[in-house]
Amino acid sequence: MASGASAMQGGRWRRAWEAIDERLGLSGLAYPVPTHANGIGYILGGITFFGFLILAGTGVLLAQSYNPTPAGARESIAYIMNTAAFGDIVRGIHFWVANLVMATVLLHMGRVFVTGAYKRPREANWLIGVGLLGVTFGLIFTGTILKWDQEGYEALQHNIEIGGLLGSFGFWFTPEFTTVLPIVGRLYMAHVVILPALGTLLLIAHFLLVKRHGISSLPAAADAAVEGTGPAPEKGGSTFAAHLIRMAGFGLLILAGSVVLALLIGPALGERPNPAIEVTKPWWMFLAFYPLEDWFGLRALLVAPTILVGLLVLLPFVDRSPWRSVRRRRWVIVAGAILAVGLIGLALYGGLTPPVSHVQDAAG
């Protein structure tokens, strides 16, 4: 009897899904999923996507109480933390998920690099990934400024100084771009409109190309197919539904973990800006550039990221061999490892050294 009721229930769900799919065509979003794609290394991108959804949801809630003006920004953050219902929890979730998303973005790109999944025909998707990396950095940087505490103020001064180094191309980053809206307000618009819109467009293109090319095969299987010693890599083996459920499950774990962290270690709010001092350091994802700024000045913050992005963009066009396994791409892997170790070393050095003053007071 129970099995009959269960079958009836399943039939109702199936008919409901078929009715929805007939009208919306949701099944058209599905793509073949190989078995290995359900491993943690191959769902980092999906985990990042669910992290972005959490950031969007908490960001909408935070925006209801945020005042994007120099006079009211910090006070509105204090209101969110101390007065708004569950404001401290929502802000804590937003803060910790931002950190986790940055980590998953970097790990995802690292996995794509190690497995050679940026190679033909996936070069365009690698370039889109580089764009999404830039959007993520931009969201975190602008979010830091929006606190409008000492850390946010110092980040803004770097923003203004770099705009000055860009000359006429950096006009948008300077207070002189418009006198009717403070630069904090413009960076707020970048944080909640411009960067999310650009990120959404890139994500749509990314998903369409994943559907077009499928999830990349394991390197050994891809090399065997090139050599002719093995069959063509599997396109299926699992289901899109199982793949999606697994990604969503990790997304819920990120949400649960960020709630716990928000309850235990909420993000702080620094003192009101003091233009006469420079005493803070950037977040961990920017720390690798901090020593370069010590040694070579503010111009290093423009030159070093440009070189890094250039290397990432050139990668699929320099490493054009059909091989994807590590042992057949030793020089690429070694070069990537040297770069990664160098960046980590710079970040550790930047984190351990005392803060140094880099910019002049740009308040005027």
Image: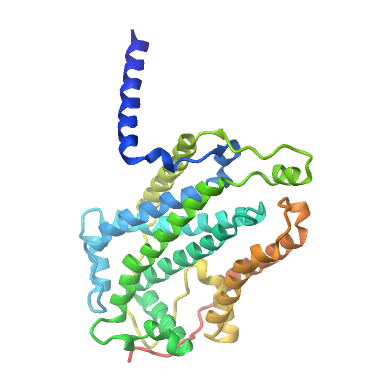
Which x, y percent locates residue 23?
30, 38
Residue farthest along the top direction in this orientation: 1
State how many labels appear. Answer: 0
Relative to 49, 74 lies left or right: left
Relative to 7, 234 lies left or right: right
Q: In which quarter of the image is residue 290?
A: bottom right
Figure coloring: rainbow
Relative to 204, say whether 75 is above or below.
below
Residue at image coords 56%, 44%: 40
Q: Nearer the viewer, residue 330 or 223?
A: 223
Residue farthest along the front direction in this orientation: 22
Residue at image coords 77%, 58%: 330
Residue 348 seen by the camera: yes
Which x, y percent locates residue 253?
43, 43
Q: Which of 262 and 313 is in front in this view?
A: 313
Q: Quadrant of residue 309?
A: bottom right
Which x, y percent locates residue 217?
64, 44
Relative to 106, say whether 228 is above or below.
above
Relative to 219, 67 lies left or right: left
Which x, y percent locates residue 35?
59, 36
Residue at image coords 33%, 7%: 1
Which image quarter is the C terminus in? bottom left
Relative to 304, say whether 103 is above or below.
above
Q: In which quarter of the image is residue 135?
A: bottom left
Q: Which of 144 and 23 is in front in this view?
A: 23
Relative to 304, say whether 3 is above or below.
above
Residue 353 seen by the camera: no
Q: Nearer the viewer, residue 92 or 82?
A: 92
